[in-house]
């Protein structure tokens, strides 16, 4: 959320997006959010939706997600008008309301409301005096709006993990590693040590009359931290590849998981993770010696207080299905980490 509150930003932000699970007494009897994960309802008039500003909105919100083997948009969009909003879309989890009113607004204004018509709902309202002002304001701050939507998605998934995950498993991981987190439902420890844990979740889903495998996993490593040299590209890749080879075997002899740098470049950026320096990474993995692969997400967190580097690597294998939401689930586990 810190990135949204930038110097010079001329919007008024009313930030009601609190931490997951903190429902106001007056909101706790609201219905659960409807719609599917990753869906965003855009409530605006047809003229704006069909204009060049609507094109820009769709271009940004439907941009492909990096690190997935197939093209998948960041969000699935629904356009709502006054006639359809209350009847169909009012309780969806993510709502973006775009409003023009020459009489009431002297400058663009952005408000964010949580739990407006449903639990864990994020409603973003952008208002301006003209279509042009609204479109320009929307374009200028699209990255911040996308971040808010991603935060809302992450909060809902984290709350689901908190409600449905195995508390005994979470406590065991904390005792082994000193790391607190919320695992997903049906997760279990495949391997464990004081310096690493491999968390797995194996499921199946019926498609076309057949059961298809869905595998998700999180590998968390603790290594001594000595210098920032450990966070250069070569060092990070070597750390991940060495750990994956040693700890995540494939289904046949001498097969193992590794980073796939042939089919996709790794995306890496510096982030602030709970006031600690971290690297966030996305890319593809493949199984050496066997035909398997999929997306992954990782955080490398510098824990200065304990002179440790915490590396958390989450992967997905779901060859018959879209991968976006499965990867968001492992991201939510990793981002729930408390040191």
Image (cartoon, rainbow, N blue to C red):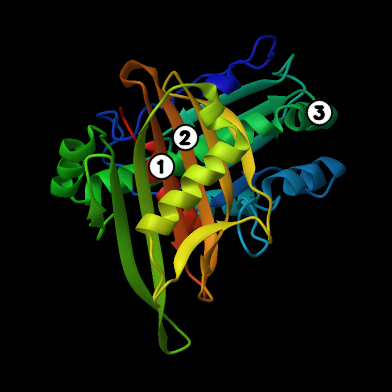
Q: Nearer the viewer, residue 9 or 132?
A: 9
Mark carried by residue 300: 2
| Quadrant the C terminus occupies | top left
Q: Closer to us: mark 3 or mark 1?
A: 1
The residue lying toward the viewer, choosing from 65 and 247, is 247
Residue at the farthest left position: 168
Mark positioned earlier in the residue sequence (3 or 1): 3
Image coordinates of residue 44 in percent, x first then y, are: 69, 42
89 vs 254: above or below: above
**Which mark lies nearer to you, 2 or 3?**
2
- Are the residues flagged by discs 2 and 3 in contact, CB closer than 8 Å? no
Give the Cα distance between marks 2 and 1. Answer: 6 Å
Q: Position of residue 10 (x, y in %)?
A: 69, 13
| Of callouts 2 and 3, the N-terminal one | 3
Q: Disc 1 designates what residue?
A: 312
**Which residue is disc 3 drawn over?**
136
> Residue 213, labelled with which disc?
none
- Residue found 44% across the figure and 46% down from its top: 331
- Disc 2 to disc 1: CB gap under 8 Å: yes
């Amino acid at each position: 959320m810190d990135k949204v509150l930038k110097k010079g930003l001329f919007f008024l932000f009313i930030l009601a997006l609190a931490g997951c699970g903190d429902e106001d007494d007056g909101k706790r009897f609201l219905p659960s959010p409807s719609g599917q994960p990753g869906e965003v309802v855009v409530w605006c008039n047809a003229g704006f939706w069909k204009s060049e500003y609507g094109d820009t909105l769709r271009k940004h919100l439907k941009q492909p997600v990096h690190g997935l083997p197939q093209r998948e948009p960041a969000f699935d969009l629904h356009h709502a008008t006054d006639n359809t909003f209350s009847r169909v879309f009012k309780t969806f989890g993510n709502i973006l309301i775009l409003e023009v009113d020459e009489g009431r607004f002297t400058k663009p204004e952005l408000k964010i409301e949580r739990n407006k018509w449903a639990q864990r709902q994020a409603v973003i309202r952008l208002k301006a005096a003209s279509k042009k002002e609204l479109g320009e304001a929307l374009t200028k701050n699209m990255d911040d709006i996308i971040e808010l939507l991603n935060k809302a998605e992450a909060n809902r998934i984290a709350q689901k993990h908190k409600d449905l995950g195995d508390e005994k498993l979470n406590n065991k991981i904390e005792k082994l590693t000193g790391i607190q987190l919320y695992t997903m439902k049906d997760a279990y420890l495949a391997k464990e040590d004081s310096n690493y844990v491999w968390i797995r979740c194996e499921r199946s889903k019926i498609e076309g009359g057949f059961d298809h495998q869905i595998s998700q996993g999180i590998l968390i490593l603790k290594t001594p931290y000595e210098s920032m040299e450990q966070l250069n590209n070569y060092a990070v890749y070597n750390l991940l590849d060495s750990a994956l080879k040693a700890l995540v075997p494939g289904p046949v002899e001498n097969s193992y998981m590794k980073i796939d740098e042939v089919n996709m470049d790794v995306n890496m950026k510096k982030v602030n993770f709970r006031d600690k320096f971290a690297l966030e990474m996305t890319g593809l993995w493949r199984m050496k010696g066997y035909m398997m692969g999929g997306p992954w997400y990782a955080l490398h967190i510098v824990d200065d207080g304990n002179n440790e580097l915490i590396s958390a690597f989450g992967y997905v294998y779901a060859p018959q299905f879209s991968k976006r939401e499965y990867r968001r689930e492992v991201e939510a586990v990793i981002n729930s980490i408390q040191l």
